[in-house]
Amino acid sequence: MKKQILLLCLALISLGAHAQITVRGKVTSATDNEPLIGATIQIKGSGNGTVTDLDGNYSLSNIAEDDVLVFSSIGYETQEIRVAHQNTINVVMKEAQELLEELVVIGYGTVRKSDLTSSISTIKGEEITKVTTGNAMDALQGKINGVQVTSGGGPGTTPKVLIRGVTTVNGSDPLYVVDGMPVGTNINFLNSNDIESMEVLKDASAAAIYGTRGSNGVILITTKKGSAGKTLFNFSSSIGFQTISNPNMAKASEYEQVFKARYTNDGRTPVWNSKDNITDAEGTDWWNEVVNKTALVQNYAFGVSGGNDKLVYNLSMGYFRNNSQYDVGYWDKINLRLNTEYTFNQHVKMGFDIAPRVESWDNTPNLFSAAMAMDPTTPVFKPEEEWVDNHYNNYARSHNNQEWNPVASLARQNAYSREYGVIVNPYLQLTPFKGLTLRTQFGANAHIRRSDAFTPEFEIDQLEKSTYSNVSREMKEWLDWNWTNTANYMRTFDDKHNLNLMAGFTAERFAEYWVKGARDDTPNNSENLQEVSAGTLNQQATGNTAYSSLLSYIGRVMYNYDGRYYLTASLRTDGSSKFPEGNKYAVFPSISAAWRLTGEEFMQHQDIFNNLKLRAGWGRVGNQNIDNSAYLTLLSSADAVFGRNPSRVTGTTISSVGNNRLKWETVEDYNLGLDMSFLDSRLNVTFDIYQKKSYDMLYKKQNIFAVGYPDWNSQVTMNIGSMKASGWELSFDWNDRITNDFSYNIGLNLSAVKNKAVKLSGDGPVNTGGFNSDQIIRNEDGAEIGRFYGYVADGLFQNLSEVYAHTDEHGTILQPNAQPGDIRFRDLNHDGVLDENDKTYIGNAYPDLMAGLNLAFNYKSFDFNANFYGTFGNDVFNTTKRLYAGTNGSNVYAGTLNKVWHGEGTSNDIPRLTVNDNNLNYTRVSSFYVEDGSYFRCKLLQLGYTLPKNIIPGTNLRVSFSAQNPFTLTSYSGMDPERPQMGESVIETGIDWIAYPNPRTFLFGIDLKF
Amino acid sequence: MKTKNYYYSAKRGLKYFINTFLLWIFSLSALWFTGCDGDDGYPEVDGQNPVLTLTTTHIQSGVGRTITIEGSVSDKDGISAIRLECEDLHLDKTINLIEIYEKPLEAYDLSYKFNIQRDETGDQFTIKVTVTDVGGRTVSQDLLVTMDGDFEKPVFTLSPDKNITVLIKAETKFNLRFSVSDDRALDYVTIEIPGIEGFTSLRLEADGEKTFDFVERITLPNIEQIYNVTITAVDRMGNESVAASMISVSEMPDFEKMYLADVATVKELNSDVFGVPMRIERTGDYQYKANYYNQQAGTKIFFLPQKSDFSPICFGLDPEDNSKLTDDPETAKPIVLEQANIYYEITFDTQKSTYSIRTYPIAEAVNPIPHTYGSTSLDTWGDGGSWLQEFYFGYMTSNPREVERFTQDKTNPNLFYLEESLFLEAGTQMNFVIHNWHSDGWWNYCTWRVDNSAEPEIFGYYGKEAKYTNPAWTKPDHVGDNWAKPAVNTTGNYKLIFDAHLERAKLVPAN
């Protein structure tokens, strides 16, 4: 009522003042009836105006009755309404037809999603920030088909990202391009809250325009920009904790029984150094001593954006910190970003983005293995009466094995790094006439890192000591720059011929400078003396400079006829400093086409497909991820022991062998895709099938010994390999709104890829994954990579008859040292000898199928999101099964006594306890260690609630509770089935060495906008 | 209306997809079933039972022996598998011929070895041999295995040395002593000593006993002469073993080798694998020096030129003049070492029959070991110590990565022994080295080499480089055989004891 009176008064006043009135109203979206925030209302021809608030309301005073109000908002059709006598004008804005489908960023340009001819997937920033993580790629897991993201666990661990499989051994990470500037293969430095969207260029027809480093796919990241209108503030935070599962190791009493049983089972007297019949209470729970139950995770982001028709800006600040599960070890980063754009006039526009940051990390040790293996009968400390001033000496030495005291190792851990970096990205854009855009952009990425480390002098025991302390400092500096110049011309002829041309050139340079100094033996371990200058012995200084550069010419033609027939062709010529004269340049072409069947006349009479588009693409991309100097033969100092009576010699020798015929590694890619929409576009289905094959793959091949190089220097990089990845992707996306209060989205991604080594070195199989003087993985020419190769474990011998029956057809005993309870290994070639010839492929580290399931439900003010991800058909070589053996006095899993074979029928998997292991149960690479590594993991459960707007007027406040990785469905017995897939390289993966597992994370978050 | 369209579209779409899906499933199923072989069976030829013909239905064997089950099998339909069963022998083997040859065979020569365990106690066993053809038809036959086979040759557990010197005395005598054993039954023993009356061809009946001991004093003519002794032991199955010896009757010779015996009986002299009696040093003509670590006060020692017996020559104290030595085993008295935990050095002259004794403490007993045993001091890369690892050594049968660690004696740091005794079977030829442990299996640090691979008597230090030797150790490197390969005559547990100062090791029965 008050409002009405006020309005009436205002109206009367307005009438009295030259018929000037105040107009109020609300602007809503026709799509979802939600208020439109930041919509612009301008008085036509005057330049005056306002924007809508968080509730979509606006108010404009001093309006003449004959004024025309112009309502506009990005993505919506602009409306003009004459005021006449209206004091209240509510406007429902329709989405602009040409923008109904989102714009997709492609290399050096944008295109409507419907016009895509290649395989590109998009994820919006709000999807990424639902997951609290230091690296945005963690949030992509399961959300983009064909992108296999494997997360690590510890603070700052970079996830492993594979886009459509593997075609090279020279790095598998995709190229990241932030706002048009290539930034390398890791985006740890980026604040997830700054991301507006990410586009994944999956096939060569899309990535070829980044030909230089596009062979592993390209991920384009666009950061948030400001928009003209009201200044908007936002603040978001999520705080929570992480936990990892306790592996449940044996306590002191069971350890003693297991330890002794190993000896007595072999007829030997136990060499036991602890008290007999020790109780659990007298022992030490090393896991609890070393690993904290929780680790803090916190993330804060603050942003402000706005602008006018000349200047738009977006300023953001972020702080992220992730503690490790130990008392030491963390990673934090402070990010600042200011993105600005100034429009001088309709022809000239300039932008300047700057993003400084500070990252710090205390190195996270890997002590899980030691905490699991340490003798639980050993106390943490020596008896107090034995303590000395150097407190590092006061920790106890393991009584019954050679494991170093993990609590002592933790206390000694002292390595810290800090990095300061900035990315600046200014650009100038000219539009001389409609359709032609000229743009020049110069980006620089500079960062400096200081790494300090100190190892104290200590002596716990003769076998657990460091005679001298060591102190080191390393300074590294990186300076990369990129200059991109493009010309873009767009024009439509006769309403049906749409042409988009682009040409340009880029220049890039990457430089790294480093120096390291170290000394031994500081006067004591005091914190004040942890400086290199305080060291008194063995002073060392090393340093070097490495740089490389690229020069590229790019061009692209995009044409479509009537929105039905599409053709895109691109060409990139790259010159790299990594290749010798004559081979520096290579050409990377691509071509792709699409046919929108639903645009055809004959499809107008069906109502099954709302959209049906067929895509096909071909392209070539390159890889140059080798040493900068791979084509050069280099010398360096040498220190070797020679002779029949060995003597140490120092001098100069060849440190690497160059190849002056090196050339680009090339990947050729074919893609066939189908986009379909059904049921009034509520169901979208995309299917792609592809094949990627590398040629001239760069590979470090062993040189001929006769050449005379020392063997460790004789590898030479050559263009000799080839790998092939073939796969398919199928995704379903269902969006529906049941009522105005309830809407939901269900997305299912399924994909599979087979990675084959057509040829590696040509010198026979490449074996990786060292294990007891053997190798776990065999990569063979013509076969899939990453497969485990070893003996087939055929259960356990249950009795003597089974031992004696394990012979060849003539009675030759295959395992003469076996006893009941030992593993039976199969003699595959029936030759009566168990040897290398009986090895076979016993598992595959790569999955047969990857799946992502994403659910989102919105009901009134509540929203619920759930993301799931899984891999199926992959195996893990679980070395942690050794923790049933107690080898060398190691601790064992709780329950080992009952779980190991201890009589006929008691187990057919875990062998008997033995100290000698004459049957090589635990030393052979065998299928005993191989487990199904399939898993289906809930990545995220998030429940959010947006508070009613009348509680804090003018604000939009959402609170949420999230659980990341709350549960995993798997039959894998190790700590984490996902972590082993990180691997050492693409040809050495799937082995569980007890690395930092992916933790469960529980978070409370708030999101405030005003 | 629009809602209706949605439903209509959904229904149509659903129907379309169901139809497509069903067609797809049908097609796949059709492909699957038509593409499959579907017939894993084999066609019958005559439908007859297999034919099994064992080479023998009775095998005489014994514990620890390997029997061979032999025969021929045929079946026109194809043989599937042959099963060998005997629960008492823990034998239950199925030879799956289809799995091995990837097809059924029509004929197969069965030849299957099976070892009868040493701890089997039964007298006889029946092995059931069953043949199954591809049609599932079976035929069986029993094979009797009795434990009465005799395959081992008699073993001389005590025999005269290969070369024996008998000194010419007023009455020149020689104790011929030997012991023979057989795992089953000895039949007889023959002794041939041409030139000695009564021993030109002597046959002694053993009457089926498992052991046969012989001791007899033989009087020899008082003239310098060489006699060849041949002793042949024959068991009931006709297996025979021969021990040969050459007896030289002479005046006192200048013996090349001399031994110290610290045991009391002939049995103890012969129960070792090596090291007893202990080889001592010859320092000049007729002159010898014995260094010995005495662990127990009152140890009695003699010096012997032969290893297997205290006769015919045994140097001990002359009962008539304790400052002299006598060579007569019948009158010689032992030299008694009264002090414990100390080293003795005894020098003597066999021609002059003189001797002297001195002692020296453990602290003065130098050894060549380069580092404190068990310390982190082994220079892994030999580069001056960039990476040190634990230094220890011990009994090694394969490579330096796998060394059975010696325990260092708490009283005498020169003395090392294996904590666990070694179980060795008769007939075994050992193969070992005393070597340091190295994590990478390098051989370049320190090792003790033997003078004679087959009969090791000296374990001399070989340090490879000066820096791998205790500077106080002045003896040159001992260049000999790397591997010691002594033979074991008697099954049992043995204890390995090594003295780094003396460079001597012995492998004697464990108590």
Image (cartoon, coloured by chain):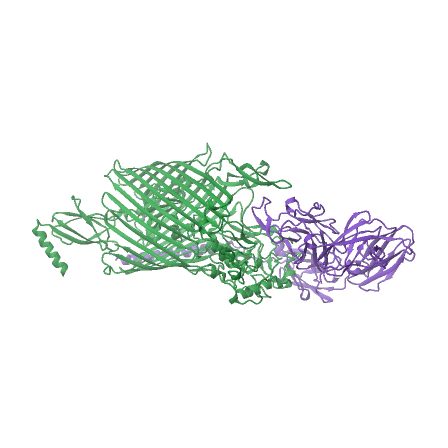
Q: Position of residue B156 (x, y in %)?
A: 80, 58
| Chain drawn purple in the picture | B
- Report if residue A184 is visible in the image: no
Res A427 → quadrant = top left
Above or below, comparing residue A945 to residue A611 in the picture: below
Instruction: State the quadrant of the C terminus of chain A.
Output: bottom left
Q: Residue furthest top?
A: A582
Of the pair A157 and A526, the residue shown nearer to us:
A526
Instruction: From this view, report whether residue A590 is shown above or below residue B76.
Output: above
The image shows residue A871 at horizontal and vertical percentages of 45, 55
| The chain coloured green in the image | A
Using residue B248 as the reference point, say whether residue B152 is left or right of it. left
Image-based side of A774 in relation to A683, left or right: right
How many numbered discs, if any?
Answer: 0
User: Residue at position x 84%, y 61% from top?
Assistant: B214
On-image quarter of the N terminus of chain A? bottom left
